[in-house]
Image: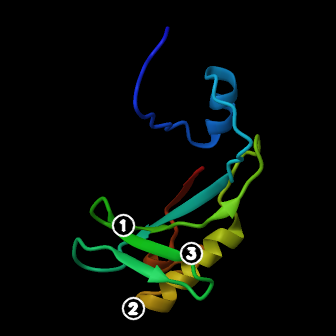
Amino acid sequence: MQLKARGLVNATGPWVKRFLDEQTHIKTSKRVRLIKGSHIIVPRLHEGDHAFILQNSDQRIVFIIPYERDFSCIGTTDIPVEAGETPVCTPEETAYLCEIASHYMVKSVTPAFSHAVRDLIRSAWLGN
């Protein structure tokens, strides 16, 4: 099949280099920096439908957005990964997200499971 276009949006994510090499005639020496972004879900941290964008001392941002009705999504980390690595949300990433959220929010968030409902991390996921 041949296709002509003035532009191409490559939405292959972490497979961009492999896609260019194997599926197109486009050759490039450029490399893709693979990263993972972890998120955690906690009981709702604030009222309202608005989101927060938090600036951390390491110059990265973390967001807190309403998630479903009773939860908040806190994310994201920006951790390099190697090709083929199975990314996981590490305890260090969870602690990082909890620390910055607790710094800005009235309700604190801790990575340890406890009996206090507000301190429970309900879920975690990531993308790369």
> For the residues marked 3 and 1, what is the alpha-carbon distance in whole angstroms?
15 Å
**Pointer 2 or 3: first along the chain:** 3
**Pointer 3 or 1: first along the chain:** 1
The number of discs equals 3
User: In front of the other: label 2 or label 3?
Assistant: 3
Q: Which residue is mark 2?
A: 106
The image shows residue 34 at horizontal and vertical percentages of 68, 51
Q: Which residue is mark 3?
A: 97
Q: Secondary structure at mark 3?
A: helix
> Which amino acid type corresponds to the residue marked 1 in the rendered image?
Phe
> Which amino acid type corresponds to the residue marked 3 in the rendered image?
Leu
Residue drawn at x 49%, y 74% as measured from the top left: 62
> For the residues marked 2 and 1, what is the alpha-carbon distance in whole angstroms?
15 Å
The image shows residue 81 at horizontal and vertical percentages of 73, 54
Residue occupying the far left of the picture: 48
Image quarter for residue 27?
A: top right
Q: Is residue 16 above or below residue 126?
A: above
Q: Is residue 52 above or below residue 3?
A: below
Q: Which residue is mark 1?
A: 71
**Pointer 2 or 1: first along the chain:** 1
The image shows residue 101 at horizontal and vertical percentages of 49, 82
Residue drawn at x 63%, y 56% as measured from the top left: 36
